[in-house]
Amino acid sequence: MPDTKRRLLDATMKLMLKQGFTATTVDQICAEAGLTKGSFFHYFKTKDEIGEGALDHFYNRQQQQFAEGEFVRLADPLEKIHGLLDFVIQSMKNPQAQSCLCGNLAQELAHTHPRFRASCDEKFSGFAKFIQTALREAKAKHRPKAEFDPESVSLMFVSLMQGSILLAKTMQDGKLIAHNLEHFRSYVDTLFGRSRR
């Protein structure tokens, strides 16, 4: 990616994480990136276009971080889920990670910007897919103590993550996210008749 385009996307992502889509202007994006409007319009026609680009940029960065996590190389699917939870809990110790552009823009724009809504839906589904696949493989490998639908549980995980991030912001308590993820861990262990490691 050209450095100028990356700087514009980084600036947009930073501003929209802080103040949302509506409050962010093209002028602010250019000032944050240290670039001119000419540079902006060389790569993007509108604020909507760079907003969608910033959403993809944010998601791709997350995917890259996950791909580099040790948990993806674990052979046992149940341990892979535990490894993902460990990874997310550790990541959330960084206050800057305690926000999600997909969640922010979904809340702000889902009813007014169909393209943003569809993009957020696609990204949430992609995130849930990892949990869903691991749970399905765990059901095949281990004998769960309770019947459950991997897709439903994976969507519950995404809901828990997004709700926890929202509550952590409003309550000013970053530890809440890890606390709720430990509840999810216990729930998964209960499904398979296991106690906390």
Image (spheres, helix red, strand yellow):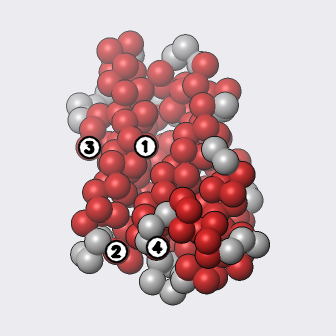
**In this view, the mark in front (1 or 4):** 4
Q: Distance between the residues labelled 4 and 3?
A: 35 Å
2 or 4: tag closer to the N-terminus: 4
Q: Which residue is labeled 2 in the image?
A: 109
Identity of the residue furthest to the bottom in this view: 23
Quadrant including the C terminus? top right
Asked whether, in this view, residue 28 is left or right of residue 109, the answer is right
Type of residue at label 2? Answer: Leu
Q: Distance between the residues labelled 1 and 2?
A: 20 Å
Which residue is found at the position 38% from the left and 77% from the top? 108
Which residue is found at the position 34% from the left and 64% from the top? 116
Helix, strand or loop at mark 4: helix
**Up-down relation of residue 150 to residue 111 (above or below):** above
Q: Which residue is labeled 3 in the image?
A: 152
* Rendered image: mark on residue 47: 4
Helix, strand or loop at mark 3: helix
Q: Which residue is labeled 1 in the image?
A: 127
**Where in the figure is residue 105, as x and y percent of width and height?**
42, 70
Helix, strand or loop at mark 2: helix
